[in-house]
Image (tube, helix red, strand yellow):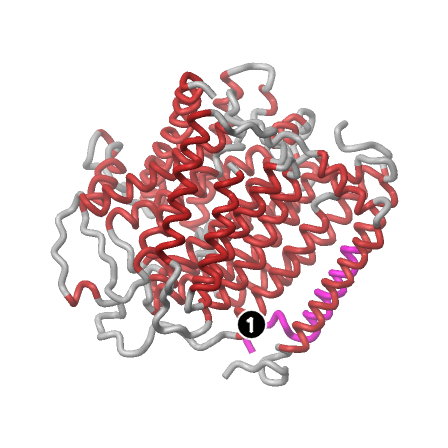
Amino acid sequence: MSFVLCSLVFGGGVIVFMSRSPYFSALGLVLATCGLSGVLMLGGAVFVGLILFLMYLGGMLVVFAYSAALAADIYPEVGAGKGLVITLVGAAVLAMVVEVSWGVVEVKGLGVQEDLLGISGLYLDSWAGLLLGAFGLFVCLFVVLCLVRGVGRGALRAV
Amino acid sequence: MTPLIIFFLFSLILCIILSIVGHRLPTRSLNLEKLSPYECGFEPHTSARLPFSLRFFLIAILFLLFDLEIALLLPLPSALASLNPTLSFLLAFIVLAILTLGLIYEWVQGGLEWAE
Amino acid sequence: MSLFSIIISLIHILLIIVPVLLSVAFITLGERKALGYMQARKGPTLVGPYGLLQPIADGVKLFIKEPIKPSSAASWLFLATPILALTIALILWVPMTFPHQFSSINLSLIFILTLSSLAVYTILGSGWASNSKYALLGAIRAVAQTISYEVSLGLTILCIIVLAGNFNLTSIYESQTYSWFILTCAPVSIMWYISTLAETNRSPFDLAEGESELVSGFNVEYAGGPFALFFLAEYSNIIFMNALSTILLLGGGSPLEILGWPQTILVALKITFLSFVFLWVRASYPRYRYDQLMHLAWKTFLPLSLGLLTFIAAIPIALDFLPPY
């Protein structure tokens, strides 16, 4: 199982630096994040894994892919690494089938959540980290707005 | 976890089979007119890609920030059930207040206006 | 894992997926019938008794139609996105509460949030890979709408989780034994329902496929089988969202929960009612304007849900009790 996930990470990485258009490299990052949060979940940190998945895939990479789709790009192509990626993903699927049918997979179910109890320490002892995070978000909001303020007055402008 | 993986694989294979059926079953007769992108009966005369829209970009960034805020708030229920719920609530309140301030600033500065 | 248990779980999977696909087929018929009667006509009547076989005829027709891939489309992404859409829509049903639960995921609500946030990729991918102006515009609109409402969906889910004290759908179901969450947090429930309308791109928020300007939105280049996959995924998501609202807000089979099968039938009736309201809304309301849509998401729902979250999180502490009652 960890082989499957690691090959996902590796295949994603290959797509990222082989592709010639940003759209496909965003897709490669998607694959890599799938693999990484899968590794976390295998290790038992299900909450952290799911949150990582939610934030990176549902948040950051959506924004990245969206901006890449907004940007003009006439002839998108995957570029060189295609064959390698297809081989890796194929090997991953094969390994998954083999592991499932031979019963090598032996992980804790998605029911264990010690990590959730640990993370709730963010609201108890390590409150400074929480407040730092919230303040960071506030500063980000401020900076983004200064960059694109209004339509014509900001530093970034629609051309 | 294994039944979950079987579920994933099964639904993926089912969808691939459906897609293959949809592509192989019908007879196909393709020509140039049919294969050109759809554009109100005209010849598509410019690239289909658009100029960059700052509005949509701003929406995406705002979504990202508030999504991260939700991620910060997700451990709140288990924290409220733990030793010191008042402290947890106070912290959650401060986080929410900071982001509400950000939202108010955004609103006042006109970052949320669509029609001008 | 033995062969026997694999076969058992395959049968279990089939027992989930086949009814979902069947109900998708019949909700399309129900939609056409309901819209028909609301406009004083009859809807489909010719295929089978009362038109009951119409969805099967539609499905067969879609799968023998010629699928077209535009010459300028990005090939494998164009083919992969419908498959991905239906796969995600089916996997979403894993953590749903059934009398015989398929899996015991403890963080089922986060699982659902994560998977439904992946659905954005299928819209974006299909619209972008089509390499057509209408498709790209429709996809960008749909994604902006979906992600805007995802924020308020997340915050409203958080309100309910704070009251239920757990991410598990079964325990949320059980914490509504005495009072449904639609009663204890009514404004949140209304926001949740409107956000599910917007999240599934239903009218009055169906700007992604505004016929008058965008023809059909992100799936305009799809025909035949691949289009059928998108269609199945969309309606499966609608039924799933209503099932989720039933469990989160309407208490599942709440008044009958001692009984076995009447409880299941009650859940099904609630889901059907909520889906019917989706169709009813479609028959009644005109489409929103895009700036009104964004106004509703960012200037009404977001501040309101931020405030309500603080209020609802304060209730258990003010009354000095803890969520798992």
Q: Nearer the viewer, residue C38 or C176?
A: C176
Position of residue C148 relative to residue C308, above or below, is below
Give percent across and percent down for residue B2.
Answer: 50, 28
Is residue B14 shown left or right of residue C185?
left
Residue at 46%, 58% (x, y): give it.
A14
Say whether residue B53 is magenta: no
Three-letter code for the amino acid on which mark 1 is drawn: Trp
Position of residue B2 relative to residue A36, above or below, is above
Is residue A77 shown left or right of residue C241?
left
Residue at 57%, 66% (x, y): give it.
B59
Report which residue position mark 1 lands on: B114
Is residue B107 shown left or right of residue C294?
right
Give percent across and percent down for residue C264.
Answer: 50, 22
Main SS of residues in magenta: helix
Say whether residue B101 is magenta: yes
Q: Which residues are magenta?
A: B95-116
Residue at 55%, 49% (x, y): give it.
C194
Is residue A94 shown left or right of residue C92?
left
Give percent across and percent down for residue C138.
Answer: 40, 63
Q: Chain of mark 1?
A: B
